[in-house]
Amino acid sequence: MSSTAEPRRGHGDRVRREHRAGARHVALALFFAFAAPIAAAQAPLQTVPRVDLDRYAGRWHEIATIPAFFQRKCARDTEAMYRPGDDGMLVVVNSCTRADGGREDIEGRARVVEPVSNARLEVSFVRFLGTWWFVFGGDYVVIGLDPDYRWALVAHPSRKYGWILARAPSLPPALLADLAGRLAAQGYDACDFVLTPQGGSGAPPPAPRLCDVAVPR
């Protein structure tokens, strides 16, 4: 925070932060805009029967993901936090640790598009004039969910990206193998997923692929 003697510096820092956030929002919008046409050629994803959004809320650790360009600054400790918003949507905050130890975070909104199951949502990180612009948003499809909400599989119809999320920062290899099989049944290649480092400091070693660490039951 700047002192009262340096008001312009504080304003400039805020403007630069807003510009950086705006650049991330544009990157996400462009990614989803190009990913959407690809999805049309893919088989439909099979969702879970029902997602209780109250139970789904809270902190999730990213266990594995298909690397995406908008996460290129993330070195470790990638997390997603969900909570109900005042506007009836879910508040989404994605955060991670950079290689230099600093934190990156971005806030968005998720809205349900399939209210029977709550398993299909749209997520937007683009806000303009006080409105969240879902025309630039991306599909968020829950295709796997532990009965006790200990882990979740989140997909996109294009299969160009996806996530394994968990309440704990790691999952045992046997469970990872089971989840890899579930992803394969939905048209994914488990070797496209890499494990996300959790904990530690500095730049992590190259992340192993899901197919190399998942031990069959």
Image (tube, rainbow, N blue to C red):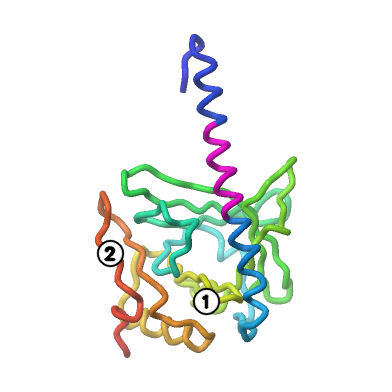
Quadrant in the picture for residue 46: bottom right
Task: Check the image and report above or below for 27 versus 55.
Answer: above
Tell me the residue at 73%/59% (across/down).
135
Q: Amino acid at mark 1?
A: Leu
Task: Check the image and report above or below for 85 versus 2.
Answer: below
Quadrant in the picture for residue 156: bottom right
**To which residue does mark 2 refer?**
206
Q: Look at the image and give the residue range highlighted in magenta.
A: 16-27
Tell me the residue at 40%/69% (across/down).
64
Where residue 30 appears, as percent x and y from the top left, is 62, 58
Q: Amino acid at mark 2?
A: Pro
**To which residue does mark 1 refer?**
145
Please state which of residues 92 and 42 is positioned toward the viewer in this rendering: 42
Where residue 146 appears, as percent x and y from the top left, is 49, 77
Indicate left or right for 158 with 133 as reference. Answer: left
Where residue 200 appears, as percent x and y from the top left, is 25, 53
